[in-house]
Amino acid sequence: MNEATGMLREALIGQKLAAVTFVLDYFQFQFDGSVLTVYTAPKAHLFQEEISNYRDELCALIAKIVTSVEEIPDTAIHIDFGDYGRLTVPLDEDSKRQVEAAMFTPFGKAPWVW
């Protein structure tokens, strides 16, 4: 396990996704105090239902509990919500619209930037 995966697991496993915020050119995912800001196009993969609207897919993860997290360097961050679904944050160069792909600010700690 790499350092980023360890930090993400420590901060997120067992936490609920409290809010999804759509800002002009980025997204924010709020987890019981920690915030993941995403500058690429995140993808929600729902296992239990089919929703065709992008916004609704992301918002369907609200109130779900994080069960697993993995960061694959220069590829993606995967946040699993048990049997319900997965949030994928692309980190690859082709997905970036600016220098950063994402920034994670754990509650009470310094931010991490990809």
Image (tube, rainbow, N blue to C red):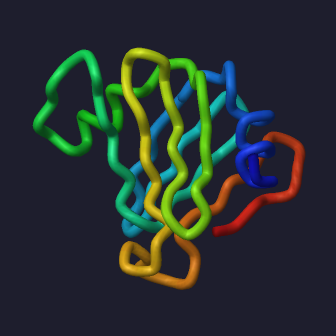
**Is 76 positioned to the left or the right of 16 in the image?**
left
Residue drawn 88% across and 43% down? 108
Vertical arrangement, residue 75 with respect to residue 82, above or below:
below
Residue drawn 60% across and 29% down? 68
* Foreground of the two, 21 or 16: 16
Q: Which quadrant does the C terminus fall into?
A: bottom right
* Foreground of the two, 110 or 22: 110
Residue found at the far left of this picture: 52
Q: Quadrant of residue 83?
A: top left
* Foreground of the two, 79 or 58: 79
Residue found at the far front of this picture: 1
Residue drawn 44% across and 61% down? 90
* Image position, residue 35 (x, y; %): 65, 46
**Is 3 positioned to the left or the right of 22 in the image?**
right
* Image position, residue 48 (x, y; %): 25, 16
Q: Quadrant of residue 9?
A: top right
Vertical arrangement, residue 95 with respect to residue 7, above or below:
below
The number of numbered discs placed on residues in the rendered structure image is 0
Residue drawn 45% across and 46% down? 21
Q: Quadrant of residue 84?
A: top left
* Image position, residue 66 (x, y; %): 58, 25
Residue found at the far bottom of this picture: 99
